[in-house]
Amino acid sequence: MNNVEIDLLKEITGIENGELKGAYNIRKDGQGVERQITENINIVTKKDVSGIDIYVKENTKFEIVHIPVIITQSGIKDVVYNDFYIGENAKVTIIAGCGIHNDHHKDSQHDGIHRFFLEKGAKVKYIEKHYGQGDGTGKRVLNPITEVYLKDGATLEMDSVQIKGVDSTERITKGVIEENASFVVTEKIMTHGTQFAKTVFEVELNGENASTKVTSRSVATEDSKQEFCSKVTGNKKCFGHVECDAIIKDSAKVIAIPEIVANNVEANLIHEAAIGKIAGEQLTKLMTLGLTEKEAEEAIINGFLK
């Protein structure tokens, strides 16, 4: 790989030298280019559509799966379907995400459709990072779709981050949660310029003691626009908590549209939303320590998105 491709991998995987270990599948410009499997994790190319099936054996513990996507060709529109089958009582970390480098005038786009099927007692930590770079006028577009199906006692923790440089994104996350299962989502987004980001969460709590907790933190600056839409439906005795916090600056716009539906008297559902500018007293306090106003703003935003 060249330096640009290595830099993209570093941004979305967090691995400094770009060398992945364990099970992994690297996709570049619409094609699978490198793969490795382990004794407990198998990766199989789909035959009917573009994408892969990832199989994790039951009782697998503490293994990591990387499935990064990088795009360096301007004008490409890549669509991939990845399905994850996690065996009973397995415990794994899955690191995905996409980095786009676009130096030209044509738009580059990646749509990743990921489905997770967790068997009884399985636990997954899912990390997804999105990043864009390049000096071209062509847009960098990322549209991830995540579907989660959790059986009895399963847990999925999803950590989704839009680092920077993404011109347009529509992020859709859906979950069907059964008895004693838990779906926890943390999302962080920052937009600037004329960028647009839309997030949609739809979760059905179908089983006794099913639960979900969704936390979205975002910063919108300049002329960018963000939309946050969530719907949590409680069909049994369950718990759901959705929290949307946003900082807004300049001429940016943020819309939050919450919806909670209780179809059972013991469904406990909560939605909280807060949108506002950086408090003046926060800036003043940091500026008394010697920071400029811009440095103080950056420190507050970085802390907010941690």
Image: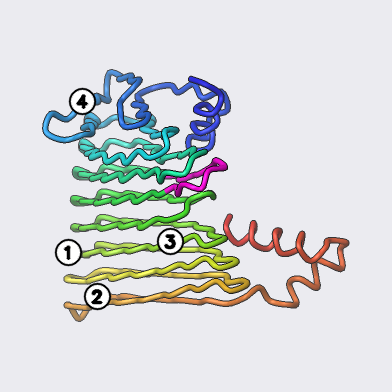
Q: Earlier in the sequence, mark 3 or mark 2?
A: 3
Label 4 sits on what residue type? Answer: Val
Structural distance between the alpha carbons of marks 3 and 2:
31 Å
- Examine the structure image and report whether residue 131 is included in the region drawn in magenta: yes
Q: Give the label, 3 or 2, closer to the camera.
A: 3
Furthest-front residue in view? 105
Q: Residues within 10 Å of mark 4 (few under 14, many from 20)?
A: some
Q: Earlier in the sequence, mark 4 or mark 2?
A: 4
The residue that disc 1 covers is: 206
User: Residue at position x 17%, y 77% from top?
Assistant: 263
Local secondary structure at mark 3: strand
Please, which colouring scheme is shown? rainbow
Structural distance between the alpha carbons of marks 1 and 3:
29 Å
The residue that disc 2 covers is: 267
Structural distance between the alpha carbons of marks 1 and 4:
31 Å
Residue 44: numbered disc: 4
**In the rendered view of the protein, which quadrant contains the C terminus?**
bottom right
Q: Position of residue 165 (x, y in %)?
A: 53, 49
Local secondary structure at mark 2: strand
Label 2 sits on what residue type? Answer: Ala
Q: Nearer the viewer, residue 63 or 16?
A: 16
Seen in the image, is 4 located left or right of residue 174? right
Q: Position of residue 242 (x, y in %)?
A: 38, 69
Residue span colored magenta? 128-140
Seen in the image, is 13 located left or right of residue 295? left
Local secondary structure at mark 1: loop
